[in-house]
Image (cartoon, rainbow, N blue to C red):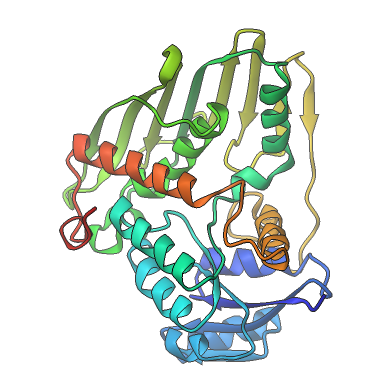
Amino acid sequence: MAPLRWGIASAGKISHDFANAVSTLPASDHQLVAVAARKQADADKFALLHGIGTAHEGYEAMAKNPNVDVVYIGAINNAHYEIGVLMLDHGKHLLCEKPLCMNEAQATRLLQHATTRKRFLMEAIWSRFFPHYRLLRERIESGALGEVREVSVEFGFVLQEIDRLRLKGLGGGTTLDLGVYTIQVCLWAFGGVAPTKVVASGTLNDEGVDMEVTAELHFPGGGIARMKTSALRELGNTATIVGTKGTMALPCFWCPLELTDVDGTVRKDTLPVARHPFNFLNSCGLRYEADEVRQCIQAGRLQSATVSHADSTLIAHIQDEIRKQVGVTFPEDTQFTL
């Protein structure tokens, strides 16, 4: 099979990490062929660093590039939908950074558009492709953990001065930026079942976006997930899953290289060394989701079973409910409705 030809939409930090991670995969499977940014200088600098042959000013130019098979969208939250529609309209497959869109209605519309265009689309929830996530699911499905009764997870760093998180105009707030991680691990542990009730409270900044959120997700059968996100302080950043037969824990749960198994064994994993330093912790693990995209596209699938369209819709639905209870609104909430 020919290598999957990647285009990178946006030349920011997470796009750098993704391109750097993809470079650790076999060139016979993956090629970085184009990058697009709003400014030509940014695209040129990115292309030079990563050895990418084509640098576009603006996303439309890359959408029209016939050499691009799939586009990774690493732009700010509220640009995902617009860029996604543009790329789908030009026949590109998509891997879109989380959150997929600004709300459930917008996400639903983008996913439906991908299905109509017969193009693969996956929200880039890279966590689920780490080997330790697979092991956690195996323990649950085999019955080794017993029935999952409780999940507790915290995710917090000092981020209140970071524009993408603090500004409403950039789609900020911890529910969209950090909450997608905590929600997804709770759903992973409870088998993707929708919670029957969501209870949330939080603290907003002067922009009207959430800087700290505490939430409970109540599941059928009495299971409960407790989650906390914060841009004001560093938290424990561990996910603990409690079953009727034991407990498992994922330190650095969003990109775990360590797992405490049901029997207390601490299992450790490693990642390859890449060409360049990364901006974020364990970002070489982005290679796992890139390979999932390749496998799905080669098999003719329009979605991944690990991060399905239904998964993304449910995550967006829970985010909407948390924001509603906390009091965070965005323009997209009135522009896009179910």
Position above or below: 198 against 143: below
Q: Quadrant of residue 197?
A: top left
Position above or below: 188 against 303: above
Query: What residue is shown at x 71% (from left), y 83% (from top)?
Result: 51
Query: What residue is shown at x 31% (from left), y 59% (from top)?
Result: 106
Query: What residue is shown at x 44% (from left), y 13% (from top)?
Result: 221
- Residue 192 image point, x, y percent: 51, 34
- Residue 237 image point, x, y percent: 52, 33
Position above or below: 97 against 10: above
The answer to whether any part of residue 87 appears in the image is yes
- Count the marks: 0
- The foreground one among 207 and 329 is 329
- Residue 317 image point, x, y percent: 33, 43
Q: Quadrant of the N terminus?
A: bottom right
The answer to whether any part of residue 163 appears in the image is no
Q: Is residue 321 left or right of residue 85?
A: left
- Residue 232 image point, x, y percent: 35, 39
Query: What residue is shown at x 31% (from left), y 56% (from top)?
Result: 102
Of all residues, the one furthest to the top in this rendering is 244
